[in-house]
Image: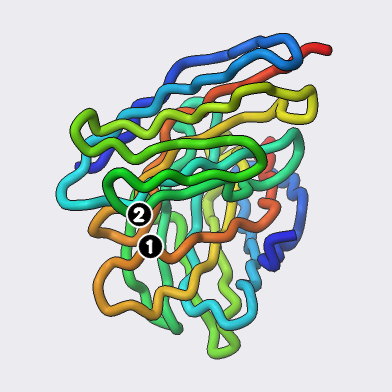
Amino acid sequence: DSGVTQTPKHLITATGQRVTLRCSPRSGDLSVYWYQQSLDQGLQFLIQYYNGEERAKGNILERFSAQQFPDLHSELNLSSLELGDSALYFCASSVDRGGAASPDTQYFGPGTRLTVL
Amino acid sequence: GDSVTQMEGPVTLSEEACLTINCTYTATGYPSLFWYVQYPGEGLQLLLKATKADDKGSNKGFEATYRKETTSFHLEKGSVQVSDSAVYFCALRGSARQLTFGSGTQLTVLP
């Protein structure tokens, strides 16, 4: 058990809908990362939040957004869903207290499997 | 940008065989390198890591050495078990904090 929790475990929805994925980081971790794992694109970084602020953006679509709340949990919002958004979405957390890029390990949650029909 | 090239799978071995999964990377500066493992139906678990050149990461009988001269971080195990069957991902963390992953290698170990 990594200490990172994600809900829900599975989500089935229809095209055009909007969903929210939730992540609770390990106790004490300030950074939350979101990744998408799909068969055609592999594992891709979407976005990072650090202590409530957006820190970095990767290949995140404009239809997707995220936020990190004062208690450090994070939500990933996916809207106007398309078939191609079906994937496994992972959240990871790390301490990230270093000023420069530090080798802090990222710990992954079990993922949310999104199926868009 | 940063990239990781990983040995294509799937790889099928008999129990107690030797394993090597090749991983090479491209990055500016001095990245940290990681191997993650994903068991069926589960999330990613950190297997081992190395943060500077010539460091050797090890865990559960797996080893990988950070080779800066060849920009490689190959995963090795001397004797695999059925329970090692999983997908293995090589990853790097460069000047940006996010991880860049390889495509993953599916390993199946037969009894």
Residue positioned 71% across, 36% down in the render:
B39
Q: Is residue B9 left or right of residue A113?
A: left
Q: Which residue is mark 2?
A: B51
Q: Which residue is mark 1?
A: A103
| Residue A47 appears anywhere in the view | yes
Q: Amino acid at mark 1?
A: Pro
Q: Residues within 10 Å of mark 1 (few under 14, many from 20)?
A: many
Question: Relative to residue B48, is residue A84 depicted above or below?
Answer: above
In three-dimensional space, the C-alpha distance between marks 1 and 2, rounded to whole angstroms, equals: 6 Å
Snapshot quadrant of residue B51: bottom left
Specify the subunit that label 2 lies on: B
| Residue A29 location (% of width, % of height) | 54, 77
Specify the subunit that label 1 lies on: A
Q: Residue furthest bottom?
A: A70
Q: Do marks 1 and 2 both belong to one polypeptide chain?
A: no
Q: Which mark is residue B1?
A: none
Q: Is residue B94 left or right of residue A24?
A: left
Task: Work out whether residue B62 or residue A69 is closer to the camera in this orientation and state it.
Answer: B62
Q: Is residue B54 left or right of residue B62?
A: left
Pointer 1 and pointer 2: residues touching (CB < 8 Å)?
Answer: yes
Q: Is residue B60 left or right of residue A39?
A: right
Element at label 1 = loop
Residue positioned 22% across, 52% down in the render:
B30
Element at label 2 = loop
Q: Residues within 10 Å of mark 2 (few under 14, many from 20)?
A: some
Question: Relative to residue A58, is residue B102 depicted above or below?
Answer: above
Quick one: quadrant of the N terminus of chain B?
top left
| Residue B37 location (% of width, % of height) | 61, 39
